[in-house]
Image (cartoon, rainbow, N blue to C red):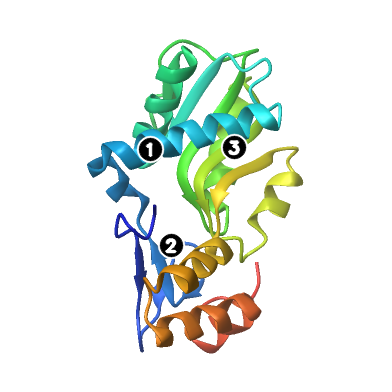
């Protein structure tokens, strides 16, 4: 579905530079999903199945969407789950980074469109925990699955829940021929050693 929606881009020559400093030959743009009602409905259904199957919704009192890309996904999830939905901002407005009632003492599900290195998720989690909220799970449509971001979050006591990774995209592309042979080969090389690939292409090689 991500391939069908045109969310996947490959680049020859100059790599994609992620905000965290890593370099990648491929880029995922989950924001395109808002334009495809059937796909987004299916993804939200699959998201709820995943979260329920992992007992990630037990005790959750609010869905919190990360500014900006996590907001529509959080809203769709909250609607289906009949839960309140709030927004956490990248920067505080006044003394608060969350919009809406206090989350102190409440267990929340943090939602974003994707995760690469996990840097922004760590910041959002710290802000929520600092406000007294309990965060045990993060949901994203897509996890790069390359820079050990899930381990970074696990150190904070937070589990990553994702529908897909670059390994899944590669498998789907092979069966559907939705990426050309050269793009598939470059993605294979990247997945074989993401840190090495990033360093060799001018990006970070370590945290």
Element class at badge 1:
loop
Q: Residues within 10 Å of mark 3 (few under 14, many from 20)?
A: many
Q: Is residue 96 visible?
A: no
Q: Earlier in the sequence, mark 2 or mark 3?
A: 2
Q: CA distance from mark 2 to mark 3?
A: 19 Å
Q: Quadrant of residue 12?
A: bottom left
Looking at the picture, how far across and down is residue 92, in whole percent?
Answer: 41, 32
Residue drawn 48% across the image and 84% down it: 186
The residue that mark 2 highlights is 19
Residue neighbourhood size for the residue with mark 2, other residues' Cα within 10 Å, grouped as few (<14), some (14–19), many (≥20)? few
Residue 161 found in image quarter: top right
Q: Residue 5, image x and y in percent? A: 30, 54
- The reply to whether residue 207 is visible in this rendering is yes
Cα–Cα span, label 1 and label 2: 15 Å
Image quadrant holding the C terminus, namely bottom right
The residue that appears at 42% across and 21% down in the rendered structure is 86
Separation (CA) of disc 3 from disc 1:
14 Å
Identify the residue under disc 1: 67
Q: Nearer the viewer, residue 161 or 169?
A: 169
In primary-sequence order, the first of circles 3 and 1 is 1
Viewer-side residue, 116 vs 34: 34
- Nearest the camera: 174 or 169? 174
**124 with respect to 16 (left or right):** right
Task: Name the residue located 27 percent from the left edge and 36 percent from the top edge.
Answer: 37
Residue sticking out furthest to the left: 35
Residue 110, percent from left and from top: 54, 32
For disc 3, the marked residue is: 138
- Which one is in front in this view, the residue at disc 2 or the one at disc 3? 3
């Amino acid at each position: 579905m991500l391939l069908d929606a045109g969310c996947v881009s490959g680049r020859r020559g100059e790599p994609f530079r992620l905000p965290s400093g890593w370099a990648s030959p491929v880029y995922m743009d989950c924001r395109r999903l808002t334009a495809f009602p059937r796909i987004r409905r299916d993804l939200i259904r699959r998201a709820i199945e995943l979260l329920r199957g992992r007992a990630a919704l037990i005790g959750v009192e609010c869905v919190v969407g990360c500014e900006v890309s996590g907001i529509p996904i959080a809203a769709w999830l909250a609607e289906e789950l009949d839960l309140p939905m709030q927004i956490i901002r990248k920067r505080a407005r006044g003394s608060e980074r969350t919009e809406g009632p206090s989350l102190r003492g409440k267990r929340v599900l943090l939602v974003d469109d994707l995760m690469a290195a996990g840097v922004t998720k760590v910041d959002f989690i710290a802000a929520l925990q600092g406000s007294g909220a309990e965060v045990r799970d993060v949901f994203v449509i897509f996890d790069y699955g390359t820079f050990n971001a899930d381990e970074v979050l696990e150190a904070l006591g937070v589990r990553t829940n994702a529908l897909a990774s670059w390994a899944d995209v590669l498998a789907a592309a092979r069966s559907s021929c939705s990426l050309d042979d050269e793009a598939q080969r470059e993605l294979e090389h990247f997945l074989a050693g993401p840190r090495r690939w990033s360093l060799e292409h001018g990006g970070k090689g370590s945290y």
